[in-house]
Amino acid sequence: MSLNVMNCSKCGKLMMKGPSSMCPACHREVEDQFLKCRKYLKENSSCTLTELSMATDVPVKLITRFIREGRFSAAQFENLAYPCDGCGAEIKTGNLCVICASKFTKSVNELKSDEARKAQQQQQANKAGGFLKDR
């Protein structure tokens, strides 16, 4: 039997399972922080991520999450950028900068070709070996 409870992902309190992974109090707090950021951005559209964080006392990580969730667009604000997950360079969309995305794509393609080559070698080895009763 499964209980319909879980721990809040932010504060750890026991709560009923629902659409959010946070308890109502933490969800409200995050929403308040979002509104604070949105208000500041309306008045200071040319601020940077660091300036926004310092002015609103909202952690950079949370502001980055708001941007990645599409709650406000970094593309709308000329100086609002967040770090690439790969190298830390400033980006306005996605998780990786162009260079890291290119490296990732190259690595995936190399893995695919390695797997295909291994499968082909295995297939040739199976054909070459055969069974004694097949001869």
Image: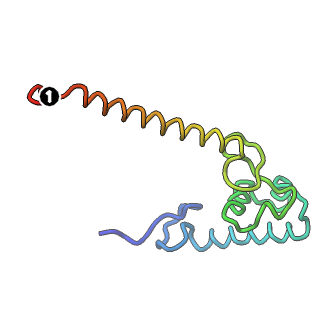
Question: On the picture, is 88 further left or further right than 1?
Answer: right
Q: Nearer the viewer, residue 125 or 26?
A: 125
* Horizontal and vertical percent position of residue 122: 32, 31
Q: Residues within 10 Å of mark 1 (few under 14, many from 20)?
A: few
Pick out the residue farthest to the left: 133
Residue 55 locus on image (x, y percent): 86, 60
Q: Position of residue 46 (x, y in %)?
A: 91, 60
Q: Which residue does the image show at 25% across and 30% down from the upper left? A: 127
Name the residue furthest front. 135
Q: Could you tell me residue 75's position as x and y percent? A: 80, 61
In the image, residue 56 above or below residue 118: below
Residue position marked by numbered label 1 in the rendering: 131
Indicate the quadrant where residue 100 lies.
Answer: top right
Q: Nearer the viewer, residue 85 or 110?
A: 110
Three-letter code, disc 1: Phe
- Asked if residue 65 is positioned above or below residue 27 in the image, the reply reads above
